[in-house]
Amino acid sequence: MSIDAYLQRGYSSLANSKLFDVPKFAPRISSLEIKSLDCTSSDKIAFQYEKVVRAPLDYLLSIPGKDIRSMIINAFNEWLLIPEKELSIVKDIINLLHTASLLIDDIQDGSRLRRGKPVAHDIFGVAQTINSANYAYYLQQSRLGEIGNPQAFVIFTKALLDLHMGQGMDLYWRDAVVCPTEEEYTRMVAYKTGGLFHLALSLMQIQGNQERDLSDLMELLGIIFQIRDDYMNLHSGLYAEKKGLMEDLTEGKFSFPIIHSIHTTPNNSDLLEILKQRTEDEVVKMRAFEIMESTGSFEYTRTRLRFLHKQARDLVEDLEVLLGPNRGIHKILDLLEVEPSRGAGKS
């Protein structure tokens, strides 16, 4: 199969959503072929190789997402005032790191859909998709020199360590079937989801003159974002269309509403047993939904989100006194509100 034909598979899947067979191995170049290469052809081959390596990454990049991270970067820049050129570097780094993390997440979670389309590893294979994600991490690390501050490397490394720490705990709870406490879960979210949020903020701050500590607000936004995402995964028809009905149940994931429900009724193991099954049965999933409704877990999640929203808005107002108004942050908080009427069982 030619490189062009290999790459075309991703774009074909976007057109007809069909899955394809993945080649088991890559053809090797003979020693005679290697000897015949000149510098020009070597550059050309390197370019073709990169297209192959990036294919899973570019496939996912071609499917539009919410791009909430770029919105958050723009909003914080209303205070930090980083020039557009420097800001675009931060956006590019965060966007590619986030996309790479989604490639890995989908493999580790056994997902079939991402943004309503087949996951990259069902098209390009697990091995190539992992390699593409790892390539993206190092590719973005190589861009840190453009920031012109040696602290960028330290900040970048810590963020990736935090991200993997959080992901590791999430996977441990799922695979060992250990239900975390709400406090433990929130700390995991601060590592996993908050890692890239903090990376964006830190890379911006080392390029500007604003030294005011904005990390508490950024951490709050990360926690709100993830808890809302957990809620919507189990309670939103739109998420069902994009990722599958209540996909967190199929993954066996201890998300925020599930954690609350299990701890509310420790003597009733029905929900825990459903999680163990990693079921795709919609009838069984609706039973889990009913259990969470009966324990008030969706209402609790909405109440918790309202509390976190108030904390965030109060913090924004305090910062606005010092740094000036920030319409972007308020718009993001508006965007992260939940609509209690859009239940998965009613869509």
Image (cartoon, rainbow, N blue to C red):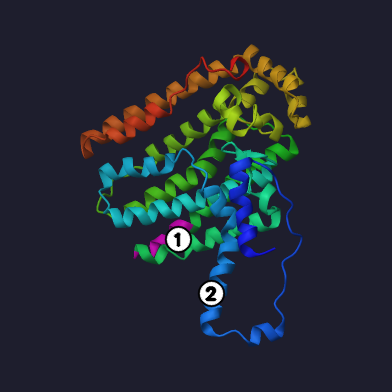
**Which mark's residue is nearer the viewer, 1 or 2?**
2
What residue is pinned by disc 1? Answer: 154
Q: Position of residue 234 (x, y in %)?
A: 61, 25
Q: Check residue 152 for magenta coloring.
A: yes
Tell me what residue is drawn at x 34 percent, y 52 percent.
204
- The residue sitting at 46% across, 57% down in the picture is 156
Q: Could you say which quadrant of the image residue 93 lies in?
A: bottom left
Q: Amino acid at mark 1?
A: Val
Picture quarter with the C terminus? top right
Please give left or right for residue 153 compared with residue 243 in the image: left
Can residue 103 be seen in this snapshot? yes
Give the main secondary structure, helix, strand or loop, of the magenta stretch.
helix
Q: Secondary structure at mark 1?
A: helix
Q: Nearer the viewer, residue 115 or 127?
A: 115
Q: Residue at x 65, y 31 (%)?
A: 247
Q: On the rendered image, what quadrant is the N terminus found in?
A: bottom right
Q: Point out which mark residue 44 bears.
A: 2
What is the x, y in percent for residue 54? 57, 59
Magenta residues span: 148-156
Report whether residue 206 is seen. no
